[in-house]
Image (tube, rainbow, N blue to C red):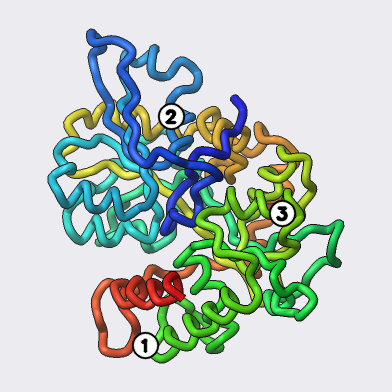
């Protein structure tokens, strides 16, 4: 299957990860047959359902897949809060949102014995504290990646620092993408010196947003709504370096006959991870577990790598993906990768009197968008 970059990509505050030209935020696929034994109701990023459509999985398990596509993770949270928890069978969502759902009782603990192949998931992802509560697993890792600096090697030398994008010669040629978590996580350490960019005091948050506004006004070509449109700017020669990027843009650009490269600057980059979870009260739990297992199987993961340029989470899938994918994601050397790439804890859900809460982060980010 050809990658379709008109389709939105995965989690985070995923306005940032919608590939170019997305017009549909919520589409429903028609069932194969009104006589199917089970209709599986799934909600997530368009393209993330591709593993379920591979290997005759649906036909062999007599499942009709009913998919609702999203443009942000918040849509899933809102839908579950509005009663969708008793109507949905499977969701794909950024790992940072799992505490919100688990604390509210909107997703159920995963019965790991019902997920064949879960033991093949790299522990670097399966053991992340954020997806667990009271010793129970509430989401299964599905895919991941890094938010690296993307640049045009035909136009500039390989950058070394995020601050390189602020050089005078690049003014008006900097790619900037609407990505709340990615932007703050990338620039807060540079602006404030913090080691944990998701634990900011209100003053540190204000300093970071002020700095991002300066980049937006004085350095960026424009604020792209997604990484697909940001890649289009490179293809047209309008930008040469990024203030935030995603390693998969290199593959996106190649399909437009444009060669890009990425680098993980000396200040480090953010790692994101998208997961699969089963909403509480899922009406078709057995089918949900079958689908979850298919999605993290070697064959399902290989579809994510080939169709969406995504990183796989299963060690069984690594030999099946192409060499470019293996080089980008460094599956054999996570120790080196995680020296420059970091998982950050999610924003505090409540005001703790010291750090900005998730609601405060969103409110302050709106100031950046309005600037």
Q: Is residue 142 visible?
A: yes
Q: Real-space Cα distance between discs 2 and 3?
A: 36 Å
User: What SS does tag 3 mark?
Assistant: helix
Label 3 Cα crowd, 10 Å radius (few <14 / some 14-19 / many 20+): many
Q: Which of marks 3 and 1 is nearer the N terminus?
A: 1
Quadrant for residue 339, please give it: bottom right
Name the foreground residue: 234 vs 353: 234
The residue drawn where x is 53% and y is 38% is: 6
Of marks 2 and 1, the one in the foreground: 1
Label 1 Cα crowd, 10 Å radius (few <14 / some 14-19 / many 20+): some
Q: Is 72 placed left or right of 296 in the picture?
A: left
Question: Image height check: is 172 above or below 290?
Answer: below
Of marks 3 and 1, the one in the foreground: 3
CB contact under 8 Å: marks 2 and 1: no
Residue 253 drawn at (x, y percent): 71, 45
Name the foreground residue: 190 vs 75: 75
The residue drawn where x is 72% and y is 61% is: 239
User: What residue is disc 3 on?
Assistant: 234
User: What residue is disc 1 on?
Assistant: 202
């Amino acid at each position: 299957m050809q990658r379709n970059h008109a389709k939105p990509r995965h989690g985070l505050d995923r306005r940032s990860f919608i590939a170019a030209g997305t017009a549909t935020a919520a589409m429903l696929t028609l069932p194969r047959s009104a006589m199917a034994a089970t209709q599986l109701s799934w909600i997530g990023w368009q393209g993330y359902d591709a593993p379920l459509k591979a290997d005759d999985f649906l036909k062999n398990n007599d499942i009709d897949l009913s998919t609702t596509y999203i443009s942000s993770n918040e849509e899933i949270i809102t839908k579950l809060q509005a009663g969708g928890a008793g109507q949905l069978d499977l969701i794909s969502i950024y790992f940072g949102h799992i505490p919100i759902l688990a604390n509210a009782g909107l997703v159920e603990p995963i019965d790991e014995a019902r997920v064949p192949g879960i033991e093949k998931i790299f522990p670097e992802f399966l053991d992340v504290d954020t997806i667990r509560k009271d010793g129970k697993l509430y989401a299964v890792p599905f895919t991941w990646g890094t938010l690296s600096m993307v640049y045009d090697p035909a136009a500039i030398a390989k950058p070394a620092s995020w601050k390189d994008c602020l050089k005078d010669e690049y003014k008006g040629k900097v790619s900037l993408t609407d990505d709340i978590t990615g932007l703050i996580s990338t620039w807060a350490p540079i602006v404030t010196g913090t080691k944990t960019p998701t634990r900011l005091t209100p003053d540190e948050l204000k300093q970071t947003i002020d700095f991002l506004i300066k980049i937006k006004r004085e350095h960026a070509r424009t604020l792209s709504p997604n990484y697909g449109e940001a890649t289009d700017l490179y293809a047209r020669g309008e930008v040469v370096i990024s203030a935030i990027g995603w390693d998969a843009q290199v593959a996106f650009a190649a399909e437009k006959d444009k060669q890009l490269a990425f680098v993980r600057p000396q200040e480090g980059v953010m790692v994101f991870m998208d997961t699969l979870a089963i909403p509480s009260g899922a009406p078709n739990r057995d089918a949900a577990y079958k689908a979850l297992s298919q999605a993290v199987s070697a064959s399902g993961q290989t579809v994510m790598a080939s169709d969406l340029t995504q990183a796989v989470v299963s060690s069984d899938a690594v030999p099946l993906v192409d060499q470019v994918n293996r080089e980008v994601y460094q599956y054999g050397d996570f120790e080196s990768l995680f020296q420059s790439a970091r998982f950050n804890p999610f924003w505090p859900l409540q005001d703790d009197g010291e750090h900005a809460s998730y609601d405060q982060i969103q409110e302050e980010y709106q100031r950046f968008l309005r600037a």
